[in-house]
Image (cartoon, rainbow, N blue to C red):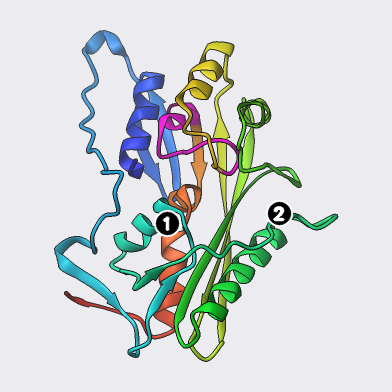
Amino acid sequence: MPASAAVAAEAMAKGGATRFSGTTVETTRRDLTKGPIIIPLQATPSTAIGPASGGVILQAPDAAAFVLASASPRRADLVRQIGLVPDHTEPAEIDETQRRGERPRLYAARMALGKARAVAVRRPGCWVLAADTVVACGIRILPKAETEAEARRCLALLSGRRHRVIGGVVLLAPDGAVRAREIETRVAFKRLDAAETAVYLASGEWRGKAGGYAIQGLAAAYVSFVNGSYSNVVGLPLAETYGLLAGAGFRHAAG
């Protein structure tokens, strides 16, 4: 779900209008006695989208192939949104065990670098982009929920409070040079009642998601506050990723 649709869903759920202030999304109450709120929503296909609007593509500074080190369809969609079409998409398949005492930001950075290097070994001489998304309550890293019990525990921790979504991004050049960024987005959930929790668990969209939710899906109705990069919460901070690519010489051009 694109940011506009996610925010619209939130506004509809709260009976409010929506406005943007910098990178913070806010909602205000609306008097429903004055008539219904009509908010047009544009559906996003679940399959990978093409290059950026108008056929604009993001070109590498050389002829080396570009590899996205991820099995996530969300990240594949996001890089295509800024005009970058990978030559290859390949999961890193590394050990993602958190080290004892490792803080969320350091963990996200280590995972992104580890993924990039693992894929670069299999794809020498290529550009490799890797990312990792971490959902944290305080210094506690929430799991990528694989069972309903894990998802329920995540939702209980997120309900009625703010949490952080930390994204680590690494661009590895063909010569091995590393460019890296970490970014943090703050997100708040409304207090979930038992029925809302049950509905979300029944949806199944929590499966495999960091923190047990997907902001681009049904969970958008429960998000009351976002401060920072929305795309970071989906799976890849686009402005920061583009900054890494532009710094390495990637440029937009007509396709």
Residue labelled with disc 1: 75
Question: Within 10 Å of the Cα at label 1, are there few (<14), some (14-19), or many (20+) other Cα atoms?
Answer: many
Stretch of the chain drawn in magenta: 210-223
Residue that sits furthest to the front in the current view: 122
* Location of residue 198 in the rendering, given as x and y in whole percent from the top left corner: 54, 16
Residue that sits furthest to the top in the current view: 33
Judge by depth and name the residue closer to the eye, 181 or 115.
Answer: 115
Please state which amino acid type lies under the numbered disc 1.
Answer: Arg
Q: Is residue 47 left or right of residue 249?
A: left
* Mark before the other along the chain sequence, 2 or 1: 1
Residue 170, picture quadrant: bottom right
Determine if the magenta segment contains residue 216: yes
Residue labelled with disc 2: 104
Residue 163, picture quadrant: top right
Please state which amino acid type lies under the numbered disc 2.
Answer: Pro
User: Is 252 rendered above or below residue 165?
Assistant: below
* Location of residue 192 in the rendering, given as x and y in whole percent from the top left corner: 57, 19
Foreground label between 2 and 1: 1
Give the CA distance from mark 2 to mark 1.
20 Å
Q: Quadrant of the C terminus?
A: bottom left
Name the residue: 35% across, 29% down: 9
